[in-house]
Image (tube, rainbow, N blue to C red):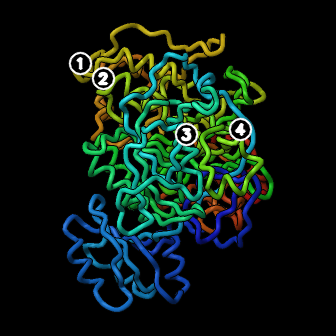
Amino acid sequence: MFSNAIWFRSTVVFIAAFILSATSANAQSPQHPQRLVAKLDARLSSSVRAHHSGTKRVIIRTTADGIPRLTNALKGNRRFVRRQHSTISALTAQVPVDELESLSKLPFVESISEDAIVKAEQTSLGGSTLRGTLGLPLQSPSGYGVGVAVIDSGLEDSPEFAGRIARFYDFTQDSRQSTSPTDGYGHGTHVAGLIAGNGVLSDQRYRGVAPKARLIVLKVLDENGEGYTSDVIDAIEFVTRNKSWLDVDVINLSLGHPILEPAATDPLVQAVEAAVRAGIVVVAAAGNVGVSPSTGEPGYAGILSPGNAPSAITVGSARTFDTNVRSDDRIANYSSRGPTWYDGRAKPDLVAPGHGLVATAAKSSTLYLNNPAARVDDAYLRLNGTSMATAVVSGTVALILQENRRLTPNAVKAILQYTALPVRDDQGAQYDVLTQGTGSVNAAGALEVAAHIDSRRAVSSSWLTTALDPSTVIDGEAVSWAESIVWSDAVSFGPVMAVNQPAWDENIVWGSGDDDNIVWGSSDNIVWGSNIVWGSNIVWTSDDNIVWGSNIVWGSTLLGSTYGTSTTWGMAVDDPSQTAWGTLDSGAGSTGSVLTSP
């Protein structure tokens, strides 16, 4: 998903896959949380403050009983109600800008968000032996019987999917009816191929991770890779409501938009959280906003929505350099780092191979026709990005659920983090937790843990059926597991997965509440509450929130002191002219330094 050196246009919220060259746009002032108009997201707040004319297509969330009252309030000229989102108690409507603030003051209105355009952009490079680098033997689980919903640009049928396209719905059309599969853009087909392509057109060289999984495809992007946020929400709600009938276990979201408001009011995040509460594992891309477009230096807090959803499995991108061994892997520079804007949560949860991955091509699509250099053997495309990495993790989740169908979404996420393989940089140091989460996905290790969990055992008791060696041999190289999870902004080390924790309940929002209320069973050896120190070198803003080199504000307060164009992290200094760009210092006890322009 998302780009190496990407610059957001003001009309773009969703960017799938990754572009190699920057897209130009005029930078505007950053939207800081304390400047939000009450109940309006950052972009709408800006429009109201600037007294813009015309109307905005918006998503309005209400109290549980507020939909009828809101519908009555919207009746009249220039207030067209387009659709209803019952799962998150919301409506999509066309509303005059000059009425947004008064509308937000209605007692039954909880938040108003822009229904912004979504867009997908990507290019080609590299190559990978995917199942080899995941440590999967030929006879490993194949995802048989597991349903994966791919919410993307659609899918073009191919022998690669061998009759496993269970359903196809076009959410770019008002009817939302099941139709014959199409993919005018090509991104969704590539993602589906990484998840479940059988490799029949390449003698299995380019097989997906779960080549026998069922695909439920929901098209939300058109032939130009564009669509509306509300279409994505509709698709998620449709899957959530019809989970049993569609037989869906996993949702893949290789999309995202700049975070414009806290997760608690973001309608897309809330749709994701509702899906997880319904028992669906949701895998989302972190974004490709990891480096400054002007300097190429790393930046933090570039996670996109819905990657900021607490219960989602948020995935960054790793480079494998076309080898199966893990010791030469590196984090892709474009992969977005945490923490999340507004909420300050640690993301991504983990990373996965996402650079130069080859998968099924939609041969009539825009991507295929316009990018001949990206074609491989006429039947495949080679693409980069956290979109691709997300698909790899969705495929891995399908394998886990085939192995153990009783696991909750929170348990699956914990297994993936616990068995992840920490990645080291060129100097041999581990990347910080805001860059790689707990490490790179370890499909073989995750399957081993899943196969030895008996989830029928009592909460707070041991649920492993055997002792496990916390390492995995990949291509002759033994690699140790992370043996940790990240709960909001704290790291838990030790035998976390040995116990059926209360936290694995799907009704608990990942990282929510007082940590003391999460009882970690007989886990005396677990170090809980080793809080992550975000460090000093975080600079994140734009015309949608990202303008590299501006002040940083999280939540409702400024985390530090402001000196003109710079910000002090946690202490006052006499010299506010220091340069902030560089490596994040996430060590304990870091007091921070000045944030200033690169």
Query: CA–CA distance between discs 1 and 2?
Result: 7 Å
Residue at 67 percent across and 52 percent down: it is 368
In the image, residue 477 sits, relative to residue 402, either above or below, namely above
Q: Secondary structure at mark 1?
A: loop
Tag 4 secondary structure = loop
Disc nearer the start of the sequence (1/2)? 1
Who's the residue at 50% across and 16% down the image?
Answer: 139
Residue type pointed to by label 3: Gly
Q: Quadrant of the C terminus?
A: bottom right
Q: Which residue is mark 4?
A: 377
Q: Residue at x 69, y 62 (%)?
A: 7
3D distance between C-alphas at marks 1 and 4: 50 Å
Kindly identify which residue carries mark 2.
Answer: 500
Compared to residue 249, the image places residue 427 above or below, namely above
Q: Position of residue 420 (x, y in %)?
A: 54, 26
In the image, residue 414 lies at what x, y percent? 42, 30
- Residue hosting label 3: 193
Residue 449 position, x and y percent, is: 42, 18
Q: Is residue 158 above or below residue 413?
A: below
Which numbered disc, 3 or 1, marks the residue that appears first in the sequence?
3
> What amino acid is at disc 2?
Asn
Residue 182 in the image: state x and y as whole percent: 50, 55
Say few, some or many: other residues with alpha carbon within 10 Å of mark 2 (under 14 / 14 to 19 / 20 or more).
many
Q: Which circle, 2 or 4, is nearer the viewer?
A: 4
Q: Amino acid at mark 1?
A: Arg
Q: Earlier in the sequence, mark 3 or mark 2?
A: 3
The residue at which mark 1 appears reads as: 457
Mark 1 or mark 4: whose residue is earlier in sequence: 4
Which quadrant would residue 206 be assigned to in this image? top right
